[in-house]
Amino acid sequence: MTVTRFAPSPTGWLHLGHLRPAMFNFLIARKAGGQFILRIDDTDPERSKEEYVDGIKRDLEWFGIEWDREERQSARLERYDDAADQLREMGRFYEAFETPVELDLKRKKQMNMGKPPVYDRAALSLSDDEKTALRAERGDGVWRFKLDQERIEWVDGILGDLSIDAASVSDPVLIRADGQYLYTLASVVDDTDMGVTHVVRGSDHVTNTATQIQMIRALGGTVPTFAHHSLLTGPQGEKLSKRDGQMSLTLRDMREAGVEPEAILSLMARIGSSQPVELRLSIEELAEGFDLDQFGSAPTKLDVEDLWPLTSRKLQGLSFADVASDIDALGVPADKAEAFWNVTRENITKRADLAEWWALFRDGAEPLIADDDAEFVAQAMTMLPEGPLDGDSWGAWTKAVKEATGRKGKGLFMPLRKAVTGRERGPDMSQVLPLLAEIPARKLAQ
């Protein structure tokens, strides 16, 4: 069975960079009829918060990403103890006592000599008495995994054949001095115990993958199929971050801003691949056509503004039944609700825009009148029929105004639209007039 996982740390809110591996791993599992695990990496008790766990679940549910089982790494500490003991017995785990300052000095010395800044394994030469003395002086040390200094090779699901010389990589720290297990060990033990068959994550984890492959083999596990997707950048290739005037990149803030989940999924499932971005209305539909082979290694350029046209397109395809509750919440009378949706659906980018349109229909708009059009508009307003307006009112009114003033085309229609709606663009005016409770521009004729 295909088994994938998403292992977020509950130390903050999920953002677009987190969504990509969550979605990729979910799509792989669903397409294969396999299992998707949500694994909460909460081994850091000080930074991990339950509100972030709730936020992670809420974000995934918003996208329709359903997990088949949930695991908490904080509940598996004894299992990590066992794995650490196993590595010690094998001679693959050793304690090191260098301070951060000492490690930094070593790195600088190596770089000055033209050597890679790799840990020199000085701790391996310490005697038991020296270790005891260092513990008394500095406290417990960190625990490092002793790499076999050979080439580590694997076929990556996106990047193809990869090979890393373990001699060019520092022996990774797996346990901090305070006893906290780090991601590298916990992830290897969990992937092995839970039968994870495929792991998709960012290309910044390639070196981690190399060391984890050795660890998996040392612990007697089966190495999963690894794939490393490209990292997201800004539209010009710059580091992805929130720009001035741009919405936040966290998923919860995007939800609050009014972006539709299908817009985000449709964009994130295709950018960086050879396939065009197309709006898909369900994650199941995305799973059917998902293929890692379509993705490349080049950085993936993302402009979050591209989410708005997709959001608008999704909303335009909704039926009245889909938005009835949103419209009812605005206080739109039941006898006008469906007509209101039909008039506005092509003129909104997000659901919140409906409130602006209803305010216009309910209260009238501040007239937008150029000085050159003031006299023309005042005359036209005297010709606007009194009482309720219907679908024929716009045509009859503009015909009468045209005959009286000689104006036609844009010079006729645009000043009237701006005077009535306060906008240069919008729905067909023959549909707008029947919904207007008040036209403030009428006062120009009084």
Image (cartoon, rainbow, N blue to C red):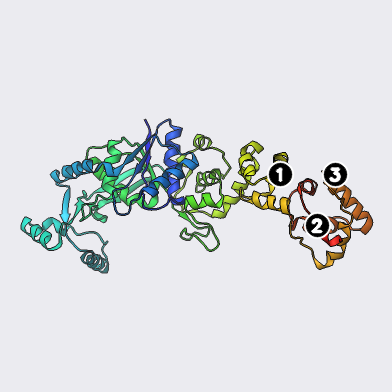
The reply, left or right, for residue 168 in relation to residue 269 is left
Q: Amino acid at mark 2?
A: Met
Q: Residue at x 50, y 44 (%)?
A: 269
Q: On the rendered structure, is 436 left or right of 244?
A: right
Quickly name the residue at label 3.
Answer: 392
Please indicate, yes or no, whether residue 205 appears anywhere in the rendered image. Answer: yes
**The residue under label 1 is which amino acid type?**
Phe
Label ID, residue 246: none
The residue tagged 2 is: 414
Is 246 positioned to the left or the right of 327 in the image?
left
Mark 1 to mark 3: distance in Å?
17 Å
Q: Mark 2 touching mark 1, by CB under 8 A?
A: no
- Residue under label 1, please give it: 340
Question: Could you tell me the amino acid type at mark 3?
Answer: Asp
Q: Is residue 334 above or below residue 232?
A: above
Q: Nearer the viewer, residue 265 or 41?
A: 41
Residue 294 spot, x, y in % from top left? 49, 42
User: Mark 2 or mark 1, which is nearer to you?
Assistant: 1
Residue drawn 50% across the image and 48% down it:
272
Neighbourhood count class around disc 1 (C-alpha, 10 Å): few under 14, some 14–19, many 20 upward = many
Q: Earlier in the sequence, mark 2 or mark 1?
A: 1
Q: Earlier in the sequence, mark 3 or mark 2?
A: 3
Q: Residue furthest right?
A: 404
Instruction: Locate residue 196 relative to residue 372 in the image: left or right.
Output: left
